Amino acid sequence: IIYGIITVLFIVIFSICFCKSRKKEIYKPDNPDLHAKLYNMMHDFDTFCNKNQIKYWAVGGTSLGMVRNKGIIPHDDDIDVGMLQEDFDKLESHSSKLRADGYELVEYKDVDLHHNPLGLHLYKLNKLNNKDYWIDIFIYKHQDHKYIYADDVAANSWPDEWYQENELFPLQRYKFGTFKISGPKKPKKFLNRAYPGWKKIRLDFPHINQSPKKILMLVYNRLGMFP
């Protein structure tokens, strides 16, 4: 009996310590250098929009990261924002200012569901003026008491990514890394609808050559021991 109690206590203590340490590990970015650049770009974008009275809000994976991670999702490689057409028109009218700051607004012609069907990217240009990393900009419209994607391809591809008016406005400010960005009034309503189970960190099943540590991470995540 004593050995049984000791074994159970050991498993419980190990599980608590393991979950705490692994939770920190899976919040680490896959590409720290890229994330540092994306944070800088998002800070510049937010400052620019606030200065020029352009409204935007975090959408997609950026919205999920804003709420769950207080920053960029570890495996993400871009920033996603939404805005209304009139605000995008304002942004576009300042394209020369953006260019002077090393950014370029580009229409992406190729419709690819793994990219932005709207085809709007704000790129950071490198020293050779080549397009480097980017912000995806999705335009929304007001229709049937909802805010939905203005682009039909996007609306049909992601039918659950819409907002009731009282879920979206007035926009709020949320922690994102070391600064704050704009987001919907009730982002969790959107996340519950668009990303069921978003509170759990996604872990893919490990390959046979991966460590027991990652297998344990998967098991504990499936049991809901990671928030």
Image (tube, rainbow, N blue to C red):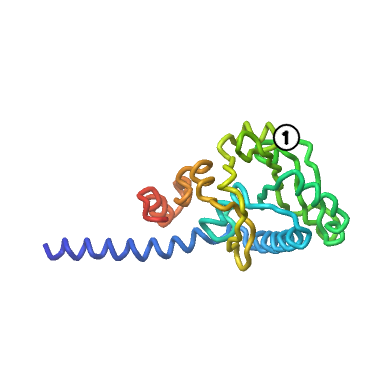
Pick the quarter of the image with the C terminus.
Answer: bottom left
Q: Is 203 on the left-hand or right-hand side of 82?
A: left
Q: Residue at x 36, y 66 (%)?
A: 17
Asked whether residue 74 appears in the rendered view, the answer is: no
Q: Is residue 131 left or right of residue 75?
A: right
The image quadrant that residue 163 belongs to is top right
171 or 158: nearer the viewer:
171
Residue 141, horizontal then vertical, whole percent: 69, 39
Horizontal side, residue 160 vs residue 123: left or right: left
Residue occupying the point 64% across, 60% down = 181
Amino acid type, label 1 = Val
Image: 24 above or below 195: below
Give the residue at the far bottom of this rendering: 178
Residue 129: % across, % down: 85, 56
| Residue 42: x %, y % from top left | 69, 59
Question: In the picture, residue 9 is in which quadrant?
Answer: bottom left
Q: Does residue 174 appear anywhere in the picture?
A: yes
Which residue matches tag 1? 111
Residue 222 x, y percent position in the rendering: 38, 48
Looking at the rendered structure, the number of numbered marks drawn on it comes to 1
Residue, x 79% and y 37% (percent of image)? 109
